[in-house]
Amino acid sequence: MTSNLYSNNDSNVRKTWVLMTLFFVIVILVGWGFSFVYNSPNILYFAIVFSLGMNILSYWYSDKLVLSMSGAKPISRESHMELWNVTENLAITAGLPMPKLYVIEDPAPNAFATGRDKEHSAVAVTTGLLAMLDRSELEGVIAHELSHIGNRDILLQTVVVVLVGFVTLLADFFTRSMFFGNRGGDNRSGQMQTIMLVIGVALSILAPIIATLIQLAISRKREFLADSSGALLTRYPEGLANALKKISSFEGQMKRANNATAHMFITNPFGAKSKKGFQKMFMTHPPVEDRIQALIGHS
């Protein structure tokens, strides 16, 4: 298991740099294309600055963006004594710094971890999760999230949020470009408008698929590994298994559920309905039944 954890850690670091580099290259190529067509090097300079800025944002501030998007609020030991003590005890056992703790006002039970590294990490849970789970089940969930921190899943998962958002914005930009108008009134400008419109329509169609593929690039195996690592941490796999059963029994979805952050949660924030066959390939989470099976050997 230890070798798996180290290899997963290294793999996540590599994937993070690959995604950030790919983002950098794509933005510069798009900027170069526009600068060539409009004969304006300023567009390329802007693309370089923009891509660097977005990479810096995704590395240093995407965790704050994710917490804000989820409506998470910081809590103290005094306001949430059990959650704080459970997290502190498990963090000590795992050899991790105490993460910042947040609570999301939402009846849907769920949780996620975020941050760029173990020294700058955070765990957020919903009020629904706290109301639904007993202490051993809560320990299972927190151990799972701490495992994501220890495995460095959190950096990759959080950076993906920014990249998925960028794909959507890029598609919207190209689609709206048709309204910029033919400033020069010549054929070249008109042709460029047509090209931009075609690219925009194509990206609008492909954006959801591209976003899903980016999310799947972080691998659903991370959930199985975090489950097993969390079970080793608590030495009570039934705690997490029972928590997953309860969470999956909730039929509703989170108030702020969205595709950009869905992969970060312990279960699908749109509802834990199992999908089978071809659809199963495009789920950001493994089916809960499979995870429980892996934890305790029966559903």
Image (tube, grey):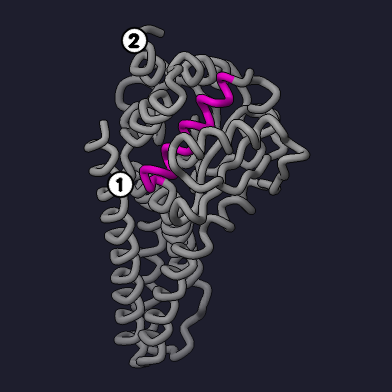
Q: Which mark is residue 9?
A: 1
> Which quadrant is home to the N terminus?
top left
Helix, strand or loop under label 2 = loop
Residue type of the residue flagged with mark 1: Asn
Name the foreground residue: 184 vs 221. Answer: 221
Which quadrant holds residue 16?
bottom left
- 44 sits to left or right of 72: left
Give the image location of residue 171, x and y in percent. Answer: 43, 61
Q: Dot 1 surroundings within 10 Å: few (below 14), some, or many (20 or more)?
A: some
Residue at position x 68%, y 40% in the image:
104
Residue type of the residue flagged with mark 2: Gly
Give the image location of residue 144, x and y in percent. Answer: 46, 32
Q: Is residue 271 magenta?
A: no
Q: Could one spot residue 259 in this view of the protein?
A: yes
Which residue is outermost to the top? 298
The magenta stretch spans which residues?
136-153
Helix, strand or loop under label 1 = helix
Q: Is residue 151 magenta?
A: yes
